Image: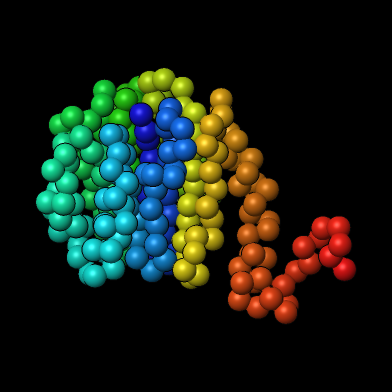
Amino acid sequence: MTFSIAGVCPDTGMVGCAITSSSICVASRCAFTRSGTGVALTQNITNPDLGPLALDLMAEGLNPTAIMAALAEADSNIQWRQLGVLNLAGEGITFSGTEALGLFANAEGKNCIAMGNLLENTGVPQAMIESFENSTGHLAERLLSALEAGLAAGGELGPVQSAGLQVCSEPEWPTVDLRVDWHIEPINELRMVWRNYQPQMDAYITRAKDPANAESYGVPGDE
């Protein structure tokens, strides 16, 4: 019911992911990022507990292979899961259990991983990988473009209804955390939200770090 991509940018230390699904509110339970650590994706018949656990193990220094083994040990229903782990160094691993839904596939590339289930075709994750590897610019833009490439390559067999985009960098909180929880064209809607959020993004970071020099809110009552 889902296809997704995770990526890191070694130059900036940013980590992030983009995800879409026919299910409602996909990003709330499937996408997990942590500053200075990496990304964890948990999808298909989802166990959201595995996302924070993967990030905790990553922060402890375990490599992706060891993390995936630990997740399998922690979840007796692992064969129903589709999981991805990508650390800050760009080392990644993906897993699809034998009970994954429909046509499913995984792909791993330079500083990125991608996967999906109930797909139109098995080439969707690789299309996202190729888009990411051949793009430049802000990590959020690269991830969103890769998600669009996955949709263009066939995407999910049925219509998608929700999507999300999340990126962490220097602050502890995500500097990009955008969601479209239910929409007839959620990826297009997510693109619209990103287009409006991007010019304001740095101002929100400044407000957290240096409020005395933050930009005006530009709303009525703000003198």
Closest to the observer: 116 or 164?
A: 164
How is the protein colored in the picture? rainbow
Q: Which residue is depicted at the point 68% across and 58% down?
A: 200
Q: Dividing the image into 4 quarters, which one contains the C terminus?
A: bottom right
On the image, the x and y values in percent for residue 105 come to 26, 33
On the image, the x and y values in percent for residue 99 come to 18, 29
Q: Dividing the image into 4 quarters, which one contains the N terminus?
A: top left
Residue 206 in the image: above or below residue 91: below
Apparent side of residue 117 relative to residue 98 in the rendered image (left or right): right
Apparent side of residue 145 relative to residue 21 in the rendered image (left or right): right
Apparent side of residue 6 relative to residue 148 in the rendered image (left or right): left
On the image, the x and y values in percent for residue 2 come to 37, 33
Q: Is residue 132 visible?
A: no
On the image, the x and y values in percent for residue 180 come to 55, 38
Q: Is residue 202 visible?
A: yes
Q: Which residue is depicted at the point 23% across and 38% down?
A: 81
Query: Which quadrant holds residue 78?
Result: top left
Q: Which residue is depicted at the point 46% across and 32% down?
A: 24
Q: Which residue is depicted at the point 42% across and 30% down?
A: 23
